[in-house]
Amino acid sequence: MNLIPYKTARRITLTAVLTVLLLPFQSEITSISAQTNDALPVLRVSFDGKFKKGMTEYLNGKMQLTDVDGSVVELPAMFKTRGATAASYMMKPSFNMKLKSDDYTEEVDSTLLDLRSCSSWILDAMAIDRICMRNRVCFDTWNEFSRLPYETQFDGRYGTIGRFVEVYINDKYYGIYCLNDRINRKLLDLKKTKVEKDGSVQVRGVLYKSGTSDINPQEKPGYNEDSTACVVSWHNAWELTYPDEYGGVQAWEPLQDAFTNGKNAEYIKKYFYLENLADYQILIMAFSIGDNWGNKNHYLSVRNINKSIDDPDPAEADKRRFVLIPWDLDTSLGGRYDGAYYNGTYSVWSLKDISKNALYPISALSGDAEYKAILKRRWLEARQGAFSVWSVKNKLEKYRDLFLQSGAWDRMVTYFDGQKSRPKYVNDLTLEIGLIEEWYEARFREMDAYFGTENDVDIITMPGSQEKPIYDLYGRKIESDALAPGLYIRDGKIVAQ
């Protein structure tokens, strides 16, 4: 075994190295480490009536959440179906859950399953995802890789976290769901709307969500009746997620200004964070997320629209910048919007097509040298950490083992196999995860070829060990008698067999 000559190598940051080699031992903010493999929490919800297709009103009810340690949380709650998918998969509907006071007049914050304290939660049914984990794996990766360009009480996180649960609705079993927190004002540290004593309102922080049916038709710019939804250009509709009760010209002006004047790179550089845009593009490219490009399934936020982008204090000017935030990532890792691709046949959106058809504002930067350099740098960092083949496989296999060892997968499959109406799933989860891992390995090689990083070999400076264990380049420990010709990590250095 010989050391690679230094001249053929490059140095990387210690942070990237630690991400690869120490990831299995971290206490992560992502939800992987929060679950054990022998059980899933059980959530029972009850209410009068039943979920109906197209319902818009919340139903009063109760929730009872039993964690794997036997602890129980019981609270009044309100429930409503959510998402376009839920309307077509009422046999396993996704829904919103709001925790309420005993008289249902006030929202009540609660920390559920060691997630952050909040009153509004998402129960994601994953009805079109045949492995019931794509959205969670993608957000775990995003949370590991990308952080807000400013400090928050949540360590700059701006993706959801969640825990898998088994759900009963009015005593009927519905299978595996994911209980997720929400992208909201508190998570993003947006400035609260100010209501004066005279009743006047000053909108400050805003959160826009792309893609909505709350306004129709969508051929011409305009607002819906209460100005909480807006068409900014042809079939480009947005909803005002925050503040959702104070729509109007003041709230929508920054978004409209961005689409009116933001077709050039200099405007984007002034009003957006380039690294945030690059991170989003890396996410979409690496995981081939086909339903989050164009004009749907993402957020734009501004911390305070009343600040000036030309403020001499950079910290104050930054509060007027936009942040791009991903959402609803279940058409990733070869998946399709209707669950049609599985068992070795997967959706593959070419990297060239993604770059060519990039969403605004990234599309304005396609030929910009500064942005392209940032994009390549972020892939170099991503490929050695959160987006490494080993890291993505680790997440997939952690959740696979959780579903199988807890018995939840078998219970769900057995139940729905006996029903006339079924969501999308596979019977052999182990086989499917293995095939998806092969798909990602191929995608990873495509990313390297696209960025010209396939031959990058890095010197790793890590503390030595008396035992000097050997790892492969994905950070997996290898027994010395199992070594094949190739590159390995030993005593903090890349070595060749």
Image: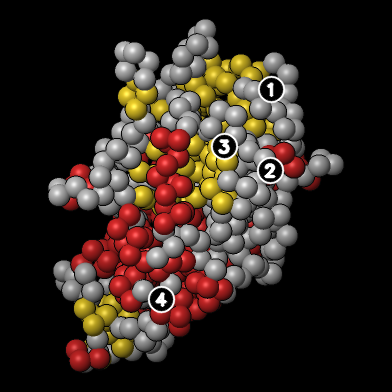
Asked whether residue 282 is in view, the answer is: no
- N-terminal of the pair, mark 4 or mark 1, is 1
Cα separation between marks 2 and 3: 10 Å
**Which secondary structure lies at badge 1?**
loop
Q: Which residue is mark 4?
A: 367
Callout 2–callout 1 Cβ contact below 8 Å: no
- Residue 105: x and y, percent? 50, 11
Cα separation between marks 3 and 1: 38 Å
**Which secondary structure lies at badge 2?**
loop
- Residue 155: x and y, percent? 27, 44
Q: Which residue is mark 1?
A: 170
Q: Is residue 336 left or right of residue 255?
A: right
- N-terminal of the pair, mark 4 or mark 2, is 2
Query: Which circle marks residue 217 in the picture?
Result: 2
- N-terminal of the pair, mark 3 or mark 1, is 1
Q: Which residue is mark 3?
A: 223
